Image (cartoon, rainbow, N blue to C red):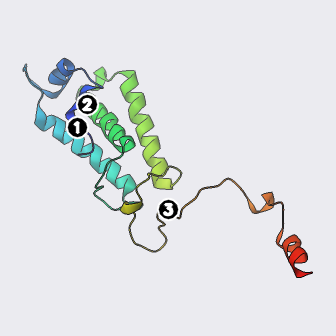
Amino acid sequence: MYCKLADLVSIIPERELINLTNDKPADTINQETINTCMSFADELINASLRNKYRLPLSFAPDLVRQLSADITAYRVYSRRPKDVPEHIKQNYEFALKILANIQKGTTVLDLPSEHPDEEGVQSSSSMYITNKRPEDRRFTDEMFRSHYAG
């Protein structure tokens, strides 16, 4: 699992987690419910990372851990849909946007050893992202040739 119970407790107070994870009054967090929600979050994350990184990740960076915790928190609250706090919804929606960006390649996780050896997928050490276009060049190919040809 990418996140741990402690990550979830940092988002949802323990007493509230006890209430949200149990359908009957209880004194402890229902670990089976937590595991189901965490598994869903991990599968959602893996679906977004599948074509970019080798899975399962051997190391989960803080970003992935936080995404998993935010998605898990939303899943726990969604067991009682009318009770989902606005900040939990916002964090969930933000997590989905980040996952979409990872899938599109606009957000890159720094995990060079996780990249598959498939053709067309570059490792992060040889990958760069730029906002420059060919027309932004100061020296055109023609200028370069005229300088070195003579």
* Dot 1 or dot 3, earlier in sequence: 1
Identity, as a three-letter code, of the amino acid under mark 2: Leu
Label 2 neighbour load within 10 Å: few <14, some 14-19, many 20+: many
Q: Which mark is residue 125?
A: 3
Image height of 131 relative to 96, above or below: below
Element under label 3?
A: loop
Q: Residue at x 28, y 36 (%)?
A: 72
The kind of residue on which mark 3 rests is Ser
**Given contact means CB atoms under 8 Å apart, are the residues at marks 2 and 1 in contact?**
yes
Extreme-right residue of the structure: 150
Q: Nearer the viewer, mark 1 or mark 3?
A: 3
Residue carrying label 1: 4
- Name the foreground residue: 145 vs 9: 145
| Residue 49 shown left or right of residue 58 in the figure | right
Q: Which residue is painted at 39% across and 53% down in the image?
A: 48
Q: Position of residue 127 (x, y in %)?
A: 54, 62
* Rendering coords of residue 98 (x, y %): 46, 43
Q: Nearer the viewer, residue 81 or 10?
A: 10
Image spot of residue 74 (x, y percent) = 31, 32
Amino acid on which disc 1 is placed: Lys
Residue assigned mark 2:
8
Q: Is residue 95 above or below residue 105?
A: above
Give the residue displayed 34% in from the left and 34% down from the top. Answer: 70
Q: CA distance from mark 3 to mark 2?
A: 33 Å
Q: Residue at x 36, y 44 (%)?
A: 64
The numbered mark at residue 54 is none
Callout 1 crowding tier (Cα within 10 Å): few <14, some 14–19, many ≥20: some
Label 1: state its secondary structure: loop
